[in-house]
Image (cartoon, grey):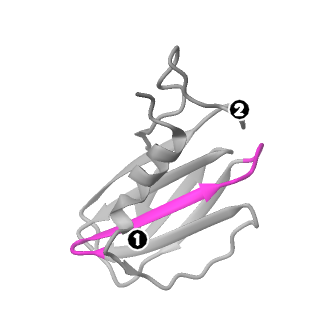
Amino acid sequence: MIKTPTYHVFDLYKYHQDAELMDTYGDTKEHVDYTVSKKDERIAISICNHSLNSKETIDFNLPDYTFDNAEAWILSADKMDAHNTFEDPNAVSKKLFDDYSIKDKQVSVTLPPMSIATILVKGA
């Protein structure tokens, strides 16, 4: 069995299931989409950078929350048509992600082109 990139995207978005959508507003480029939701004691932030060649930094201000810690994962590739094969079943797979920072109730994320990431902020 080969796990497709779509499988990994669904895995990244599982933290939004049965969660409460949070109203968020921000200035982002037209090739960046995101969703933020809250469930129990955590906030899930998922961001997609559709650009084929530029990395993007996105800041999220969450003034009403206190953070204990966070963990994050990313799905990205070097080529637009990258995919998994029987010869290389992990060419596109979920990896730990650390290009984010949390400071003064702000989460700042820098995403490479052609990527999607989920940051799970705990202690909200």
User: Front-most of 115 and 102?
Assistant: 115
Say whether residue 43 is magenta. Answer: yes
Q: Inspect the image, locate mark 2, and give the three-letter code of the amino acid beneath it.
A: Lys
State the quadrant of the N terminus. top left
In percent of width and height, residue 110 lies at 58, 52
Q: Which image quadrant for residue 76?
A: top right
Residue 120 picture quarter:
bottom left
Inspect the magenta stretch and tell me whether residue 3 lies in it.
no
Q: Which residue is mark 2?
A: 79
Question: Which residue is painted at 23% across and 69% down in the image?
Answer: 123
| Span colored in magenta | 39-54
Q: Amino acid at mark 1?
A: Asp
Q: Where 103 sits versus 88, above or below?
A: below
What residue do we see at 67% from left, 31% from top?
78
Judged by depth in the image, the label closer to the viewer, 1 or 2, is: 2
**Front-most of 26 and 90?**
90
Kindly give the residue lying farthest to the front in the view shown: 1
- Mark 1 sits on what residue? 104
SS category of the residue bearing label 1: loop
Quarter of the figure with the C terminus: bottom left
